[in-house]
Amino acid sequence: MTQERRGSSLRWTITLLTSAAIALSYLDRQTLPVAIRAIQPEIPLSNEQFSWLNSWFLIAYALMYAGGGKLMDVLGTRRGFLAIMVWWSLACASHGLAASFVMLAASRLLLGMGEGGGFPAATKAVAEWFPAHERSKAMGIINAGTAIGAVIAPPAIAMILAAANWRWVFFLSGTAGLLWTFWWRRDYYPPAQHPRLTEAERDKIREVFSADKPQEPGIPWLRLFGFPQVWGLVTAKFLSDAAWYFYLFWLPKYLYDVRSFDTKSVGYYAWIPYAAAGIGCLAGGWFSSYLIERGHSVNLSRKVALGASAAVMPLIFFVTEAPVQLALALFSIAFFGQQSWSTLVMILPADLFPHRAVGSVAGLVGFGGAMGGVVFGLIVGWTLDHGFGYGPVFAAVSSFHVLAFLIILLTIRVVKPLDLKETV
């Protein structure tokens, strides 16, 4: 095998490995929303309490997303990802020991602390292993892990609930994460240290990547707030993830409460929008890379793909008046657009910032997204418990991505590596 082919093969193997971790994270975070109907006879929960459980997860997730990005820059991707996977797998399993709302909240908090480092680690791995023209494809595959985990969750959890107590949903999900750590420890190394590469092969990879990884010194974490591009990404992610976390945490409950689904029906149908989300991950990454390969600039390629993703999101406005089959189709379109969008937003830090700052920037962007989920999730819980229904909620989420796209256009005039000396 030639040097270039061996390096390429390893890159895509690492992409699948990282995507599997993201799939597990989305399986873990879906355990509570899908199992909620089985949990409530033992631990009664109102809509506002359910929103607080999600909020505790997202608050911890937001803080650790920012801190996790810095952790990846300090510890490195190999050690950092291993540590956070062990943490969040044990935290997921701890839900199975809960006997009260407070215990569930503590478990959600611990789960969020661990999972917050997942996407910064994934972004860091992409920056370590992929040149610019392949990054969006790689991130698309990795981000498709969100859909794989979420697609698996409804039918898998329904089967577990049919065979055992709801607590086993959490025990088995946590075990799957711990098993993944053995795979990661065996197979992931940064290119300069990978035992399957010869020194000549490592030099070849450095040569291929050298143009994409400016050698400016790292940026102190607080100085990142001086970049308008960071503020734009954080604000855009705040808006778009407010919608995404509503879909992620509330879709099963919406199907239970409004469409009169039971656990079996949720397991049978609720995976469909998440499958569309997976296609969106791949489509957004592929389309942007296709435009680059056809000779268009990174700036145009990223923005055209982002704009196309945002353009389909207002269709969700009509979901409350649609029959159930059409409602699932509208959810599927929204999930497709959201994850196409998310793939592209997550790769922008690697397009804009030097390698040593990518994890930190990605962490701040994820912090903004999670806080959007916190704020909007609490609004949703209050809205539903006070009798306003889902209509105002879907009206709001139908506009978020369009607003986010306009913010990106205003704050990131050109997608290209920044001249840090001129910008800061």
Image: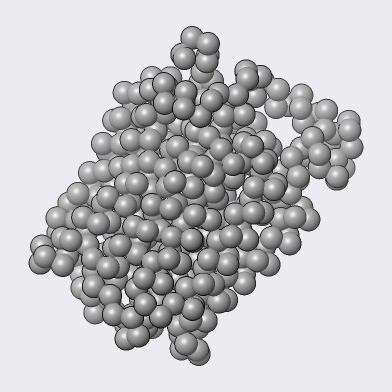
Q: Nearer the viewer, residue 190 or 305?
A: 190
As drawn, 235 above or below 279: above
Q: Residue at x 38, y 66 (%)?
A: 105
Can residue 57 be seen here? The reply is: yes
Image quadrant of residue 135? Answer: top right
Image quadrant of residue 215? Answer: top right
- Whether residue 109 sits left or right of residue 320 in the image: it is right
Can residue 30 be seen here? The reply is: no
Image quadrant of residue 257? Answer: bottom left
Kindly give the residue lying farthest to the bottom in the view shown: 163
Name the quarter where the N terminus is drawn.
top right
> x, y percentage for residue 23?
55, 60
- Whether residue 396 sits left or right of residue 369 in the image: it is left
Kindly give the residue lying farthest to the left in the view shown: 387
Q: Residue at x 73, y 60 (%)?
A: 183
As drawn, 278 above or below 261: above
Q: Residue at x 76, y 24 (%)?
A: 207
